[in-house]
């Protein structure tokens, strides 16, 4: 049976594209077509969350390039009777890979690498939404992805949705939400110090909250830093002794 898809995007002259689905299937091949359910659910669909900075196009392109680990994970998500542990472990591998990590990198490792690589050498701050989701959030996401794929394939019989990322609320299934904060409270209070006056006043967010400056701060850690809460500073940038009059400082 012939099947066609009409694009809702029109050109200035009013024309539009029509795709022959059977032809596309022949071009992609059966093996790749069988993995499209995984890419669709993993990157987001009506019942799964969207991963910031990772769209369907970029995820699909990574799959087309033929990465063996990504393809293996995609295939595993179409096999029934998988354990939650297996799905969570494979899903964390995929999440790390989608954010440019190596297959051995954990989600936490990718979060750290992105902050250091993009945040430290530049003057711009890496916003939390551009980081990979936490490991716990990733596991919940992958559970719902697997359950959705089983539903699409019609082989979800015997599966309890409440074991796969859902809970009952007012007789309706709603997604499970992470029970923990995205980061420790002390970290959530701080964005990043970008002081150009050696952190001398409470305008410095780290000094204001009683925290030491860290390696991604700029430029205070590259020059002299006057944050009294610092414990470890570079040898070339020791704290200067301050007078009793300045800032009401009184040494113990």
Image (tube, rainbow, N blue to C red):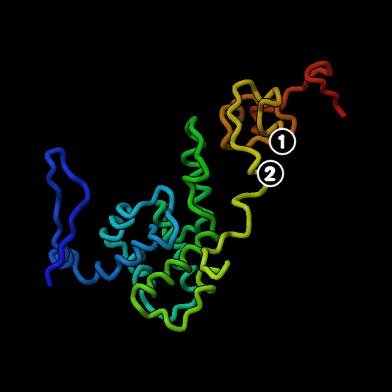
Residue extending farthest right = 252
Above or below: residue 243 compared with residue 106: above
Residue extending farthest front = 170
The residue positioned 50% from the left and 54% from the top of the image is 133
Residue extending farthest top = 245
Above or below: residue 219 compared with residue 138: above
Quadrant for the N terminus, please: bottom left
Quadrant for the C terminus, please: top right
Determine which of the numbered discs, if any, sits on residue 186 in the image: 2
Percent coordinates x, y for residue 154 in the rendering: 35, 78
Which of the pair 230/42 is nearer the observer? 42
Q: Whole-Å distance between the Cαs marked 1 and 2?
A: 8 Å
Q: Is residue 113 left or right of residue 32?
A: right
Percent coordinates x, y for residue 73 in the rendering: 38, 68
Residue 207 is drawn in which quadrant?
A: top right
The residue positioned 74% from the left and 34% from the top of the image is 229
Q: Is residue 155 left or right of residue 119?
A: left
Q: Which residue is mark 1?
A: 209
């Amino acid at each position: 049976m012939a099947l066609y898809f009409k694009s809702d995007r029109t050109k200035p002259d009013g024309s539009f594209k029509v795709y022959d689905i059977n032809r596309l299937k022949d071009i992609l091949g059966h093996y790749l077509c069988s993995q499209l359910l995984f890419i669709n659910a993993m990157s987001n669909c009506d019942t799964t969350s969207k991963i910031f900075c990772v769209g369907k196009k970029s995820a699909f392109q990574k799959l087309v390039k033929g990465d063996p680990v990504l393809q293996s994970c995609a295939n595993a998500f179409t096999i029934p009777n998988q354990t939650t542990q297996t799905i969570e472990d494979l899903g964390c591998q995929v999440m790390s890979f989608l954010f440019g990590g190596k297959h051995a990198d954990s989600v936490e490792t990718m979060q750290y690498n992105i902050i250091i690589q993009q945040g430290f050498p530049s003057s711009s701050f890496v916003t939390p939404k551009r980081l990979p989701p936490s490991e716990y959030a990733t596991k919940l996401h992958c559970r719902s992805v697997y359950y959705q794929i089983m539903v699409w394939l019609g082989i979800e019989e015997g599966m309890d949705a409440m074991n796969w990322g859902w809970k009952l609320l007012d007789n309706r299934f709603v997604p499970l939400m992470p029970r923990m904060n995205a980061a420790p409270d002390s970290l959530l209070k701080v964005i990043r110090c970008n002081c150009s006056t050696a952190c001398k006043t409470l305008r410095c967010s780290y000094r204001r909250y009683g925290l030491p400056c860290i390696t991604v701060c700029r430029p205070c850690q590259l020059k002299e830093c006057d944050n009294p809460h610092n414990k470890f500073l570079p040898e070339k940038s020791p704290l200067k002794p301050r007078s009793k009059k300045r800032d009401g400082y009184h040494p113990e």
